[in-house]
Image (cartoon, rainbow, N blue to C red):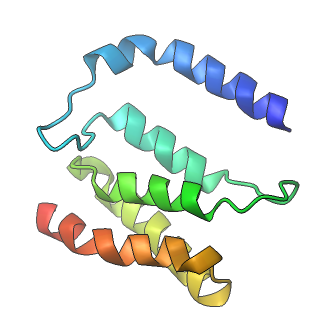
Amino acid sequence: MLKKIIKRLCLIREKSRTDAMEADSSKDNSCTNITHIRLFLRFLKENDNTQNPFIDSNYLATLIGSLLQAKNDSVVKTILKEVLRYLQLERVLPSHENAVGLKILKQYNTFCQNH
């Protein structure tokens, strides 16, 4: 499983190397490149921690925080849908130290101000 993920990440990195060089970021390091935003959304949607004995709540919180800092208006609805899904999941099955829920609540206000 881990080998598949590493191989997929290497392929994605090689494919998006030229995109990364052209990525436009604003002064506050918020990503506006649609390719990176969709990649983060895909990581959230396909996150599977069933065979991993370690807690991935900090990883999820970081991904969600990065998505909520995005300033691309074309994917706002998709970002909100995925973030609300994780917030509902947080109510049913809380993450370690509520890391995911706290990150969502902290970043949500700035996300609403930007859009």
Say if 55 sits above or below 23 in the image: below
Say if 10 sits above or below 101 in the image: above
Residue 17 locus on image (x, y percent) = 44, 14
Residue beneath the point at 26% across and 48% down: 74
User: In the depicted view, which residue is nearer to us: 31 or 41?
Assistant: 31
Whether residue 79 sits left or right of residue 48 in the image: it is: left
Whether residue 104 sits left or right of residue 89 in the image: it is: left
Residue 16 locus on image (x, y percent) = 46, 18
Residue beneath the point at 39% across and 42% down: 37
Residue beneath the point at 11% across and 38% down: 27
Q: Answer with the quarter of the image where residue 111 lies.
A: bottom left
Whether residue 83 sits left or right of residue 110 in the image: it is: right
Q: Residue furthest bottom?
A: 91
Quadrant (top left/top right/bottom left/bottom right) for the N terminus? top right
Q: Residue furthest front?
A: 97
User: In the depicted view, which residue is nearer to us: 29 or 38?
Assistant: 29
Residue 104 locus on image (x, y percent) = 40, 72
Q: Answer with the quarter of the image where residue 7 lies.
A: top right
User: In the depicted view, which residue is nearer to us: 96 or 105?
Assistant: 96
Residue 10 locus on image (x, y percent) = 64, 20
Residue beneath the point at 61% across and 64% down: 57
